[in-house]
Amino acid sequence: MADRAAADALETPSGKWSGDENFPVGSWLLPARLRPHVAAYYAIARTTDDIADDPELAPDEKLRRLDVFAAAVAGETAAGSVPATAARMRESLATTGLGPRHVLDVIAAFKQDATKRRYASWDELMGYCNLSAAPVGRYVLDLHGEDRATWAVSDPLCNALQVLNHLQDCRDDYRALDRVYLPEPWLAAAGIGADALDAERSGAGLRAVLDRMLDGVDGLMAQARLLPGAVRSRRLAMETAVIVRLAGRLAALLREGDPLARRVALTRRDFARAGLAGAIGGLVLRR
């Protein structure tokens, strides 16, 4: 028990939970038998992300803690000394027969967050998103037994959601962690530096960069809209159709709003409308 307590002490919970996300996590649209596994995946992703985002931890300590979680999920640690969230994920993987790759990939992304603060290009940012976001969709698809060819349209959706989240949090990431996901050459081309994120409102230069990021999101969403029609599961088609609509709505809100002036976020009405329209749209696609 002492070993387990010491392992659990490695966590630094932020207080965020699935209801704070821009997409439904294990919603009622998914089969009931799979929801606990989605919840286990979300829990370990949330836990390790919180470690990477803790401003009180030094980079080396973040890496040490993340290594503990990676080793635990990979089965390289004795069961009695595995953090509770990792133990739950290990049990889930054993039950479903899935390997740990999709968990280890997101942990690798958070290890990158611990030390990397700037990005040199959109492609470099997409490389990060392929570790931090794409594995989430891949895990859910594998859990449903979907063909891995669907990754080609799932990855763009997950990566678009990740970029949208970066835009929502761009000022907080800069102020708390000195972390900037906006490509540095894009900032330079607009005649500004990262310190433009410390303002109370976006200037013309930063607005141009934000819109350029949203143009990239639009390109990803053009592929992502194919996902609901590509999956075999009727319930998953409905779930992904909802997420596609939520992503589109959030992108539109970020076009209209200023994430420096206030947090731009989806409302309950947005969730309700996207849920109804997306679920119906996904159902029609499957029929």
Image (cartoon, rainbow, N blue to C red):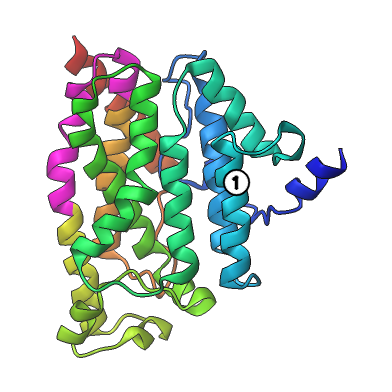
> Residue 252's quadrant in the figure?
bottom left
The span picked out in magenta is: 218-238
- Measured as percent of width and height from the top left, residue 115 is found at 46, 70
Q: Between residue 59 and residue 49, name the one nearer to us.
A: 59
Query: Relative to 94, does residue 240 appear above or below in the rendering?
Result: below
| 204 left or right of 108 in image | left
| Mark 1 element type | helix
- Is the residue marked by circle 1 packed among few (<14), some (14-19), or many (20+) residues within 10 Å? many
Query: Relative to 43, does residue 236 appear above or below in the rendering?
Result: above
Query: Relative to 286, does residue 249 appear above or below in the rendering?
Result: below
Query: At x 58% / y 43%, what residue is drawn?
Result: 71
Query: Relative to 131, does residue 34 appear above or below in the rendering?
Result: above
Q: Name the residue under label 1.
A: 69
**The stretch drawn in magenta includes residue 237:** yes
Query: At x 60% / y 48%, what residue is drawn?
Result: 47
- Measured as percent of width and height from the top left, residue 156 is found at 22, 44
- Measured as percent of width and height from the top left, residue 218 is found at 16, 52
Query: At x 59% / y 29%, what residue is drawn?
Result: 90
